[in-house]
Image (cartoon, rainbow, N blue to C red):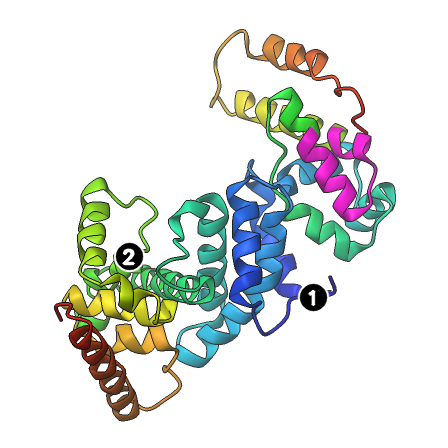
Amino acid sequence: MSGSPARPPTQEAALVVHQRLVAEDPTAANDVAAAYLEALVAWLGETDARAPEDLRIEAAEDAILALIRNPSSYSAGLQTLEVYLRMSARGDLRNRLAKEQRRQTGRTPWSSVELSPDAGKYLGRFDDPATSLRVAEEKKSIGDAIPESVRGRLSETDLRALQLILENERRTSVYADLYGLQHLSAKEQRIKVKRNKDRLKMVLKRAGGKA
Amino acid sequence: MNRRLEHLAGRVAGAPDFLASALAEYARSEQLADAALAARLGCTAETLTHLRLCRMPRGQAPLFWQDVAKIAGRFSVDADLVAEIARRGQSLMNLRKVEDGRIQEPGFLLAARDDGREEKPPEGAP
């Protein structure tokens, strides 16, 4: 236990520690922080290098603490814990940046799409710890549109992407987050995201689902 | 020494759901600096950081001792001392809330003392 690894654990190990969080093992909180904090901060440093370092650290901490305090907010069937924490941390960073902007200027937050209210922490829809019954029902209905035969063949990340497609999510940045493509140029992100989306649509089409 | 974890541990030092807050209250009441606190627990400064990032043991007696045993076993520290730190830390935090006017119920202090008497370790608990 000598420091956090820069590389987060495997999804298999992540599920174990997540289960310990759910079971209220008091030592699991430390283990989650030790396993993910360093890697999350490093990831935000790569993807949001222009954001102040203290905000990046606090955003990574926010994401870890939110998971510790509400472990059921993570659903293993939708994405890996690593991806979930990344999306959560990025949302927290945006919120903190917007707050900082308001504090400094005394004006309403940035009006760009990137930082619009829709671009906050729970944009991923499934990330909101306080997911309402209505949203849960929507998720179920969207999930139902993915045939069982397809579910078994796709990775968790692909399944999550497929659900986003079915929700008509169009922003490249959301898919780039999901697939960990932020280090690429905007053009490369668009190309790779399109390739993934086309592949998923084809899988769904062949299986007789609706895309 | 992991500075990220230390930073997070510092951040939750005032959060009643983390052991960090009880450790902070205990250290204040005993006038212990970090090194002295670690020495009393018989652990390294690094382990102290990990202890701080554990959740506070749950309040109900059987769960309290279960959580204390888990924390103590995991980090090889004395379970009785962890229990004392958690209890005293929580009491001091509650007292502080009373002082700050956040808790005003007259029976609060009596209830806190009663809790302390009732929470005896179950058979076989460390």
Which residue is disc 1 drawn over? A3
Dominant secondary structure, magenta: helix
Depth check: give the residue in front, A6 or A112. Answer: A6
Q: Secondary structure at mark 1?
A: loop
Say whether residue B79 is magenta.
yes
Q: Quadrant of residue A125?
A: bottom left
Residue positioned 24% across, 69% down in the render: A162
Chain letter for mark 1, please.
Answer: A
Q: Is residue A27 left or right of residue A193?
A: right
The residue stretch that appears in magenta: B66-83
Q: Secondary structure at mark 2?
A: helix
Rendering coords of residue A56 (x, y %): 45, 68
Residue positioned 35% across, 66% down in the render: A152
Say whether residue A88 is magenta.
no
Rendering coords of residue B83 (x, y %): 74, 30
Under mark 2, the amino acid is: Tyr
Q: Quadrant of residue A154?
A: bottom left
Residue positioned 20% across, 72% down in the render: A207
Q: Quadrant of the C terminus of chain A?
A: bottom left
Under mark 1, the amino acid is: Gly
- As drawn, the label of residue A122 is 2
